[in-house]
Image (tube, rainbow, N blue to C red):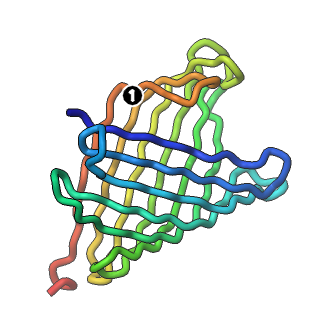
């Protein structure tokens, strides 16, 4: 059986510089009740006057399950701070840069800090911009830099290509590639 994923993403208030953003993600190993991950995340956003971008502080709770019949779970709590900065490249490429700092508390593990950088690109296919009714190509890449209390670092990169439509919540996944790289200093870990 295939894996199942359900998402809900919150929306900012359009009439204020302050807002709320959040998401709930429920992932299963088998498309049913075999929990892979439940993520609940929410934050307060702020858009400064005269500056492009949105800044967020928030909290998240993540429960991860094991594949198969085991009901054992691992719980993680996070605090995070983030910045989302828009950029236009030419007339038809709309970029967003996201930088996020996370403080992570995972049951039974050392405190961890992670830095995330994501680059989002939306390219309209049937209109000159992302107005209502536009079909677009969505490209996404995110790099995760993990630092633990034993002075080890690791990096993960996720790349996504999808198509979307401005009037629909769902995008169709074309491909997703994950790669991981661990960087450790042996002298510091001994």
Depicted 59 relative to depicted 8: above or below: below
Q: Image quadrant for the N terminus?
A: top left
Q: Quadrant of the C terminus?
A: bottom left
Q: Point out residue 99 in the picture as x, y percentages from the top left corner.
A: 53, 58
**x, y percent for residue 106:** 35, 74
Residue at x 81% of width, y 55% of height: 17
**Label 1 Cα neighbours within 10 Å, binned few <14 / some 14-19 / many ≥20:** few
Among all residues in the image, which is located at the extreme top? 126
Q: Is residue 63 left or right of residue 185?
A: right
Give x and y (percent) for residue 184: 21, 72
Above/below status of 109 relative to 145 = below
> In the image, is 156 to the left or to the right of 184?
right
What residue is at 33 percent from the left and 38 percent from the top?
A: 4
Q: For the residue labelled by badge 1, is the local secondary structure a helix, a strand or a loop?
A: strand
Q: Quadrant of residue 122?
A: top right
Q: Residue at x 62, y 66 (%)?
A: 57
Identify whether 74 is placed above or below 28: below
Taking depth in this image into account, of 139 and 7 the one nearest to the observer is: 7
In the image, residue 74 sits, relative to residue 55, either above or below, namely: below
Residue 161, image x, y percentages: 40, 30
Count of numbered marks: 1
- To which quarter of the image does residue 73 belong? bottom left
Q: Which residue is mark 1?
A: 173
In this rendering, position of residue 97 left or right of residue 184: right
Q: Residue at x 66, y 17 (%)?
A: 133
């Amino acid at each position: 059986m295939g894996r199942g994923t359900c998402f809900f993403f919150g929306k900012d208030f359009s009439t204020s510089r302050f807002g709320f953003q959040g998401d709930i993600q429920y992932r299963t190993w088998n498309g049913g009740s075999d929990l892979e991950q439940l993520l609940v995340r929410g934050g307060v956003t702020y858009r400064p006057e005269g500056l492009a971008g949105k800044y967020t502080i928030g909290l998240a709770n993540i429960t991860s399950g094991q594949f198969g019949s085991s009901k054992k779970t691992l719980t993680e709590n996070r605090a995070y701070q983030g910045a989302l900065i828009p950029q236009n490249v030419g007339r038809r490429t709309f970029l967003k840069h996201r930088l996020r700092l996370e403080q992570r508390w995972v049951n039974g593990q050392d405190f961890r800090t992670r830095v995330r950088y994501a680059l989002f690109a939306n390219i309209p296919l049937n209109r000159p911009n992302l107005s209502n009714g536009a079909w677009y190509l969505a490209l996404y890449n995110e790099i995760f830099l993990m630092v633990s209390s034993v002075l080890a670092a690791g990096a993960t990169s996720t790349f996504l290509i999808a198509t979307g439509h401005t009037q629909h919540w769902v995008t169709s996944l074309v491909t997703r590639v994950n790669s991981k790289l661990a960087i450790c200093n042996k002298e510091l870990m001994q």
